[in-house]
Image (cartoon, coloured by chain):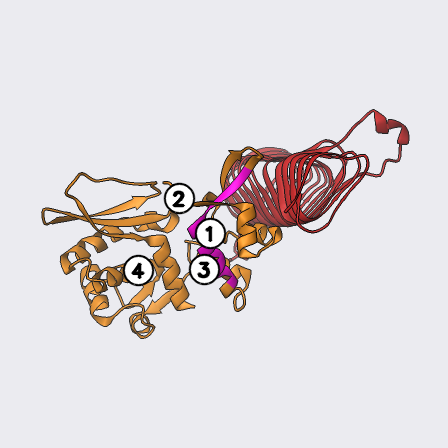
Amino acid sequence: METKKRGDLLINGFGSSNGGSFNTLTINGKGTVNGDVNCMEFDCNGTGTINGNVVSNTAKFNGHGKIKGNLESQSLTIDGTAGITENLMVKKLKVSGKANVGGKIKSDEIKIKGRLTVGEDCEAETFKAESQFTIGGLLNADLVDITIFANCKAKEIGGQTILIKQKASLLGLLKGFIPTQLETELIEGDKIEIENTKASMVRGNNITIGPNCIIGVVEYSGDLSMDEKAVVKEVRKA
Amino acid sequence: MSEDLISKKDLLDLAGISYGQLYRWKRKDLIPEDWFIRKSTFTGQETFFPKVKILERINKIQMMKENLSLDELADMFSPNIADLQLEKDELIKRNIVSKTVIDYYLEIEKGGPEFNFSRILEVYVLEKLLQSGEINLDEGKMLIQVLLDNKSLIKQKSAELVITRKLGVSSCFLIINTESFHFERGTKIVAQLSLMACMEEIKSKLL
């Protein structure tokens, strides 16, 4: 990419612009960009709206950003809120605020400490979440490591290692009042360790079912250990 | 299309792979999305696969993953190919096409001796059908015309090529993403070829 000749696009205050190729694109006030954008650095600190697809090297949302299209980037950090109406393709995704993706996510590394909503599938090599999330399709990752903070939902979860833990409660008092759990139809993996999970089907090799799980059917081929406080309707050994 | 289906569990047993591997391959797009067929069974939802296709694909992946990384494999199975350029002589040397066919192709297409992937595919299809004796030169000409006119369609979708003959008149169809097709009585399907499969054949020959 020829980047030296490119200019920067900076919107401070109210403003709007057409899309195009830039070195850096910064929105500090309330900015709107109409059209596809190709840039090295995308920074949104105020309220930014892009009506088009975005391709960038690094992308950062600190305020409130909205992309009406696809976003493709090497890295994406969301500290504010971000909405992407279509697909999100990033190597490294870090969400500390709130992210809403209408389509699917394809990534290498996903780290979430906020809230994530995905309309379709979510794919990554590693998926680490200490948060609340809703995934409309399949959560597919080599390593799925989830600490449940609030109600989580995924249609299906599949991968090699799947770990689902309940957040260690600091306020023991509140524990009884706010039941949090992860809800899914199907969990499939080689190594599965789950807590506080409601699933209709769990299939895998080595399965550990922790407290407060409500499971329809467990199918395993290696080892299975179950907590006393788990409710499992049916166990099948493959 | 009534195909033999295999459930995910049976597939893993049969192929000796783990859930992790299957999901990884799916992530890398080694297994196409539309092969995952969801059906409800008495135990709830189950995923099924077209048995013949998936076993063949897994076989290929297992055979080739010794020499190639998963990303290279993904390139191989995906229909959108990297910018590959080959000389005419190189294609002949690698046994992808014969000299007569490539000369005939160039005569119709009137292009240069540099072949990109879509041109390789066209000439390969021509070679395949001519060599098997299923079509004659005139039909070959028609076939190339169809492929040339629909170049952009072929790249993205799983396309199938069908050549029929009725009362000595032949026609050529390019069929995109269909389940099945039927003709009136008396029409003979001379040749039927999946372009996706052809692409994979070429790629395995090139690597």
Closer to the observer: label 1 or label 3? Answer: 1
Element under disc 4: helix
Same chain for mark 3 and mark 4? The answer is yes
- Read off the residue under disc 1: B54
- Is B52 contained in the magenta span? yes
Q: In which quarter of the image is the N terminus of chain B?
A: top left
Which chain gets the red colouring?
A: A
At 31% from the left and 41% from the top, the residue drawn is: B180
Residue A35 in view here: no
Are discs 1 and 3 less than 8 Å apart at CB?
Answer: no
On residue B119, which mark appears? 4
Q: What stretch is highlighted in magenta?
A: B46-62
Q: Name the colour assigned to chain B in the rendering.
A: orange
- Read off the residue under disc 2: B3
Of all chains, the one bearing label 1 is B
Of all chains, the one bearing label 4 is B
Amino acid type shown at disc 3: Met
On residue B76, which mark appears? 3
